[in-house]
Image (cartoon, coloured by chain):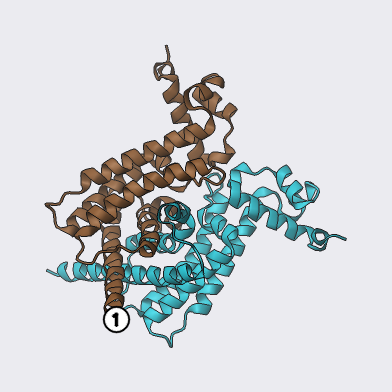
Chain colours: A cyan, B brown
């Protein structure tokens, strides 16, 4: 029995899909290629996942489950807001770093052709939004509660935390900076500062507008 | 002569590639599919662009040329920093909005397999970095000049400005907010405030560290 044989076929298919979807994009991967990479018969993909779309759904679900758990576990109300934010961002960055393929699919894979995936992803995003806006940011003295600002800020937050993983490779070519553990420690710190400064400024501006609209 | 025939074949190929690469991702698109979509013989793609990779290079070049022009034209030293930043961000947002396919490829298409594309993209990013850090941000009282912070902040800036286009669709399903002109006006304003607040906080923290390292 080789090592591969010890991994159950369902997991082999899942792992092959995570790796191939992340590398080539969901649309570019065929079921035959998936089956070959996983070392299974092509019919196993329908059997376990109901096809390629079911696999994508499972991967997205896995990503959001882990992501929500990490945020929940990092929020610690006994810490000051800044420390709590930094701790949460450090945990998210570690997650992005340790599961790059899973996170790339969970964050950037767009459900172009599937309303089913779009709806599914929306439910998951809602849960994360509640964790961040209703739990973490409710500690900010200025609360962001209007729909438009939330629609602008939610994608901005995740994009900033993910920015190194989305666009870092090109900037590394430019600056020559090594992405080692020390870099990611600085990254978590700097991104936390950036994000807290940004949110504070937006919240202050909203508060100003509310104040001035009384006249 | 139909309308399509009036467009030169080179442009037809370029436009078909922008649309297909954006929709499916570069790896998922074949030259045969490109030729069919453009209504040209397959050999024309090599003739005009030296193949699929040449096309990607041209698209990335087109994106960065337009992007740099927009930033250059929006920077107006006679305006206060905040206004100058808002004006630049509003122009960039309009560009992202009006050329979604071109911008998606320019920003998110990763040069996984091609050092040639990676190097090419890096040169272009360097030019934009100089415009933003050396021209726009040099007006900030606190200058960000260390390589590590620039490696962190550059991707963060572009990710924030692009966040609605990367992740907005899902949040729209959650909040029900319409992405109309009024929304993008608010988006440009809010993102500018967020970004200025974030940069100021990072610059202040750097300054504090420099100060305290004297002791």
Characterize the local packing of mark 1: few (<14), some (14-19) or many (20 or more) Cα atoms within 10 angstroms. few
Say above or below: B49 vs B183. above
Residue under the point 23% across and 71% down = A207
Residue under the point 43% across and 88% down = A78
Residue A135 seen by the camera: no
User: Quick one: SS at disc 1?
Assistant: helix
Q: Number of callouts in the render?
A: 1
Residue at image mark 1: B212
Task: Give the quadrant of the N terminus of chain B.
Answer: top left
Residue A123 position, x and y percent, is 52, 62
Given residues A146 and B108, the one toward you in this image is B108
Say above or below: B16 vs A45. above
Residue A28 position, x and y percent, is 61, 42
Task: Give the quadrant of the C terminus of chain B.
Answer: bottom left
Residue under the point 46% across and 36% down = B57
Residue A68 position, x and y percent, is 53, 70
Quadrant of res A15:
bottom right
Given residues B83 and B165, the one toward you in this image is B83
Residue B100 seen by the camera: yes
Direction from residue B176 to residue A32 in the image, left or right: right
Say above or below: B36 vs B105. above
């Amino acid at each position: 029995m080789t090592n591969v044989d010890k991994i159950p076929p369902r997991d082999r298919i899942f792992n092959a899909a995570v790796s191939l979807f992340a590398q080539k994009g969901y649309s570019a991967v065929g079921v035959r290629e998936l089956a070959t990479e996983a070392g299974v018969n092509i019919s196993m993909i329908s059997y376990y996942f109901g096809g390629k779309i079911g696999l994508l759904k499972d991967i997205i679900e896995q990503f959001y489950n882990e992501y929500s758990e990490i945020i929940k576990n990092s929020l610690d109300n006994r810490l000051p807001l800044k420390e709590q934010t930094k701790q949460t961002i450090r945990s998210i960055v570690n997650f992005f770093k340790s599961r790059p393929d899973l996170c790339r699919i969970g964050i950037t894979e767009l459900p172009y052709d599937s309303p089913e995936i779009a709806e599914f992803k929306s439910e998951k995003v809602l849960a994360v939004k509640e964790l961040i806006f209703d739990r973490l940011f409710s500690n900010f003295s200025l609360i962001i509660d209007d729909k438009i600002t939330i629609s602008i800020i939610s994608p901005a937050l995740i994009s900033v935390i993910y920015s190194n993983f989305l666009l870092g490779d090109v900037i590394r070519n430019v600056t020559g900076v090594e992405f080692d553990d020390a870099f990611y420690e600085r990254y978590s710190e700097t991104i936390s500062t950036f994000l807290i400064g940004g949110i504070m400024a937006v919240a202050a501006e909203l508060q100003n507008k509310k104040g001035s609209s009384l006249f």
